[in-house]
Structures are given as structure tokens and as C-alpha cells.
Image: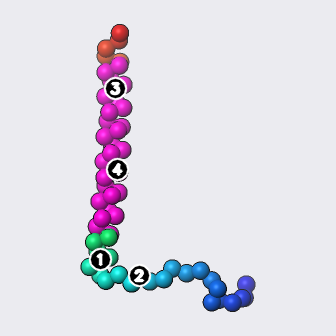
Amino acid sequence: MTGDRSREPYIAPSADPPEQIGRKSKAGRGIVLLIAAIAVLAFLLYLSVLIYASIVRV
């Protein structure tokens, strides 16, 4: 498909300095780890409620 290539979308290179890029990537990893930790804690809470409910039958 030939056409005007100047109209194609593209991702511009980052204008941030390397120090800021490193800080942003570190913050991004931290946010991902925080979300993963919350998910694991929620699953452990779910399992503990299941175990408690199976042991203590009211």
C-alpha cells in the first residue's frame, strides 16, 4: 500500500534525560510489584476464609 508516509502514526522518541527514564522505569516496576502483592494478599485472605469456613461449621 503506497501512500503519504508522513501521515502514518509513530511513537516519538522520549525527550527525557537518562536519569529520569531510569527513575520512571523503577517507579513502574514498583507499581507492578505493589499491585501483584495486593493480589497475592487478597488471594491469601480468600483462602483463609475458605479454610476457616470449612473448619468452623456453624
Rate crowding at label 2 as few (under 14), some (14 to 19) or many (20 or more) other CA atoms within 10 Å: few
In terms of sequence position, does the residue under pointer 3 or pointer 4 come before the other?
4
Residue that mark 2 sits on: 14
Residue that mark 4 sits on: 36
In terms of sequence position, does the residue under pointer 4 or pointer 2 come before the other?
2
Residue visible at 36% across and 44% down in the picture: 39
Q: CA distance from mark 1 to mark 2?
A: 10 Å
The image position of residue 56, as x and y in percent, is 31, 14
| Residue 37 part of the magenta segment | yes
Q: Check contact, mark 1 vs mark 4: CB within 8 A.
A: no
Name the amino acid type tagged 2: Ser
Of the pair 33 and 14, the residue shown nearer to us: 14
Please tell me in which quadrant of the rendered image residue 46 appears. Answer: top left
Residue that mark 3 sits on: 49
Q: Check contact, mark 3 vs mark 4: CB within 8 A.
A: no
In terms of sequence position, does the residue under pointer 1 or pointer 4 come before the other?
1
The image position of residue 13, as x and y in percent, is 44, 83
| Label 1: which secondary element | helix
Mark 4 vs mark 2, foreground winner is: 2
Q: CA distance from mark 3 to mark 2?
A: 47 Å
Q: CA distance from mark 3 to mark 4?
A: 20 Å
Of the pair 26 and 54, the residue shown nearer to us: 26
Of the pair 49 and 9, the residue shown nearer to us: 9
Q: Is residue 34 left or right of residue 12?
A: left
Residue that mark 1 sits on: 20
- Vertical relation: 45 (above or below) 22: above
Figure coloring: rainbow
